[in-house]
Image (cartoon, grey):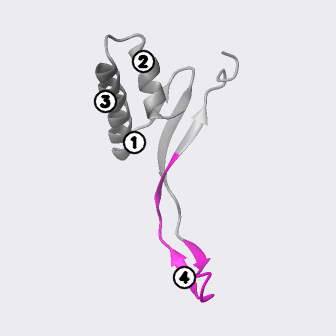
Amino acid sequence: MNKNDIARELSKILSSKKEADSAVDKIFEKISSALKNGEKVVITGFGSFNMFVTRTKKGRNPKTGEALLISPMKKIRFKQSKDFFDK
């Protein structure tokens, strides 16, 4: 399922496909901005999204074999709710 499929399903409830596309875009925009601001996004019955920063770690260039440090990165973690599969 992709973003277009979600909008198509939502358009069955809303008045038009254009309105559904706009709603889906707005939802993902709000989730993205909340995560960028360091907030935790919780969707009851589905799960939660949380932003975290990885540690600096040792790595190796596969072409040259040269050792290097991989800098910290921001990543998103999803944790499903306990009753995710029960519904």
Q: Secondary structure at mark 4?
A: strand
Residue 10 badge: 2
Q: Dot 2: within a 10 Å radius of its alpha carbon, few (fewer than 14), some, or many (20 or more) residues?
A: some
Closest to the camera, between mark 1 and mark 2, is 2
Q: CA distance from mark 1 to mark 2?
A: 24 Å
Identify the residue position indicated by label 3 in the image.
26
CA distance separating discs 4 and 1? 29 Å
| In magenta stretch: residue 75 | yes
Q: Position of residue 21 (x, y in %)?
A: 34, 27
Q: In the image, what residue type sits under mark 3?
A: Lys
Which residue is drawn at the image coordinates 56% and 39% (left, top)?
78
The quarter holding residue 74 reads: bottom left
- Along the viewing direction, whichever of 24 and 8 lies nearer the viewer: 8
> Which residue is tagged 4?
68
Residue 32 on image: x %, y %: 37, 40
Foreground mark, 2 or 3, reads 2
> Looking at the image, is mark 3 or mark 1 nearer the viewer?
3
